[in-house]
Image: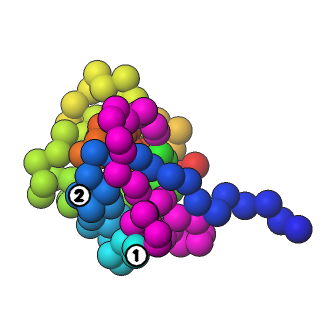
Amino acid sequence: MTIRLNHTIVFSHDKKVSAGVLCKILGRPAAMPFGPFLAVRLDNDATLDFMDAEGDVALQHFAFLTSDVEFEQSLAQIVARNLMYRSDPYRRRPGEVSTNDACRRIYFEDPSKHLLEISTKG
């Protein structure tokens, strides 16, 4: 049997808002209800299952590998929404795209402040 990540739960202040923003930025179909979750399906069949948090949200980091075309489309969605993006996970270089490691990479926050990363190379 091959072991693959199937899903992870993403606690959010508002699962509809957080899942909706991620779907728009990544060009994914609308999140699908699944019990108390809204599931955002990725191309490798894993899902991010957004769930409303009761109280504080423990912040997490999620990294997404994209093609160059998908990277440009996602960056355009981020810019159109006036979301701050940075080239480093320490949040020191706002409005810049990293070109280290022979790839392009940005970091930005979702509505619940999870740190999301989009990269053209893993």
User: Which residue lies under the disc numbered 1?
Assistant: 32
Q: Is residue 97 visible?
A: no
Identify which residue is drawn at 21% across, 53% down.
78
Q: Is residue 54 covered in magenta?
A: yes
User: Which residue lies under the disc numbered 2?
Assistant: 17
What segment is highlighted magenta in the picture? 34-61
Residue 24 x, y percent position in the rendering: 26, 66
What's the amino acid at mark 2? Val
Counting every numbered tag in the picture gives 2
Residue 21 x, y percent position in the rendering: 25, 59
Q: Is residue 3 covered in magenta?
A: no
Q: Secondary structure at mark 1?
A: strand
Residue 65 x, y percent position in the rendering: 50, 56
Identify which residue is drawn at 37% across, 23% down.
90
Q: Secondary structure at mark 2?
A: helix
Tell me which label, 2 or 1, sits earlier in the chain: 2
Q: Is residue 114 above or below residue 18?
A: above
